[in-house]
Image: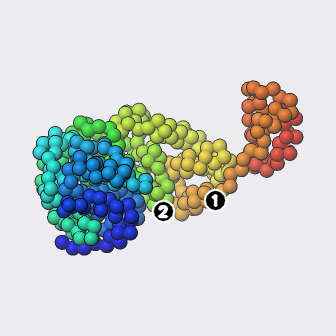
Amino acid sequence: MSAIDIRKWKTNKNIQLIFKILEKNGEETRFIGGCVRDLIVKRKKNYDIDLATTLKPNVVIKLLKKKKIKIIKPGFSHGTVIAIINKEKFEITTLRKDIQTDGRHAKVKFTSDFLTDSIRRDFTINAMSCDIKGTLYDYHGGIRDLKKGEIKFIGDSKERIKEDFLRILRFFRFYAYYGKKKITQTQLKIFKNLSKNLKKLSSERIYSEFYQILLSDNQYDVIKLMNNSGVLKYLIFNDNNIERLKSLNKLIEINHLIDFSTRLAILMNKKNLNKISKNLKLSKDEVFKIKKILSLHKNFDFKDFKKNKTKYIYYYGYDECLSLLIFNFANFPNKFNSKDYLKIILSLKNLKIPNLPISGKDIIKLGVKSGPKVGKILELIESWWVLNNFKPSKKECVERLKDYN
């Protein structure tokens, strides 16, 4: 056992309250899994606080209700309860062991032993726990593997994957964020042999893992590994554009600005959009954005964009213009200087986008009856106003209206 710095948790009143409630009568509760791992690596992004407890789920609920704490029970049969205190969520799970698995779900039996609970977890870096005093419990060498950048299964990797085939994707997800050590050919071969079982999983579970992989800074290398080990084809098919994804390494400074839909549009073959949408259960907004990017790019002229940045953002919005520029760079990475391209992208946020100084009410005031004609006149005025670089004032726009009345 060793100690870690948990000052940020000790000063959190919500955390202190939850431990005070759960640790009565000799029961024990610990921080568990991802939150411990991310605290150790000092990950800056917000992460959820997961807790493991010796208390049975019904007792957890009883204690929380007594203190009038809001409760959600998404995985009650597996021992999980979510407590919400001042809008902060805490996922509280009773210690357990898997007694039967089918590659997707597990039947569990509750236990009071933290070591037993740790054995059922997937990777060593996810099995660490920590008490409220900061004492770290690392039964499987998680800190060692975290430092080495090795994503290591607890036990035999083949057998652990057979318990839940999602662990194939989880491996690549954690490798994308924490991996340094080269994955062995033996391990990649195991993934290849078992990857067909991904078809047994729900689209929602697959999407959740793939989403996080594609948003990582290490996306290209990991996606390439997934492709070479025969995993990627079960998500987005074989005929994809992985090398286009590589170009995003040149724009690493703005990686945090590039959304999932834009990355997927770059990676996928557009003819597969409908099938991929079904495979991953993409949202209507995601499908709409991908289609919009593909459509706008057909006639996209980068030189014209540089001259008329304000015009483009006025008509299409900042997010769509950002996606369009990134998609364009990914298609022609050798055509542009990445530093100059970055400057243009970063300059977009500072642009002040003007508002059309008149509205339909101004047109009606001039005697035009309310109806379709008002909208048509407004469109004509807007086109004239944009053509004149957004400079005409309200007075000038009203004067111009007389030509259309």
> Residue at the spot x=25%, y=65% of the render?
130
Task: Name above or below for residue 114 compared with residue 75.
Answer: below
- Left or right side of 14 for 181: left
Please state the horizontal and vertical placement of residue 171, each as a whole percent of the image: 25, 53
> Residue at the spot x=33%, y=40% of the render?
204
| Disc number lying in front (1 or 2) | 1
Please state the horizontal and vertical placement of residue 11, each as a whole percent of the image: 38, 69
| Viewer-side residue, 104 vs 112 | 112
| Viewer-side residue, 111 vs 342 | 111
Task: Name above or below for residue 63 compared with residue 279.
Answer: below
> Residue at the spot x=28%, y=67% of the render?
132
* Residue count near mark 1 (Cα–Cα under 10 Å), binned few <14, some 14–19, many ≥20: few
Question: Which residue is the site of mark 1?
Answer: 350
Name the element at disc 2.
helix
Three-letter amino acid code at the position of disc 2: Glu
Question: Which residue is the site of mark 2?
Answer: 253
Three-letter amino acid code at the position of disc 1: Asn
State the count of labels.
2
Please state the horizontal and vertical placement of residue 162, each as a whole percent of the image: 16, 44
- Left or right side of 7 for 255: right
Q: Is residue 356 something one can see in this rendering?
A: yes
Q: Quadrant of the C terminus?
A: top right
Q: Is residue 123 something one can see in this rendering?
A: no
Q: Earlier in the sequence, mark 1 or mark 2?
A: 2
Task: Name above or below for residue 200 compared with residue 64.
Answer: above
Please state the horizontal and vertical placement of residue 106, each as a whole percent of the image: 18, 43
Q: Quadrant of the N terminus?
A: bottom left
Name the element at disc 1.
helix
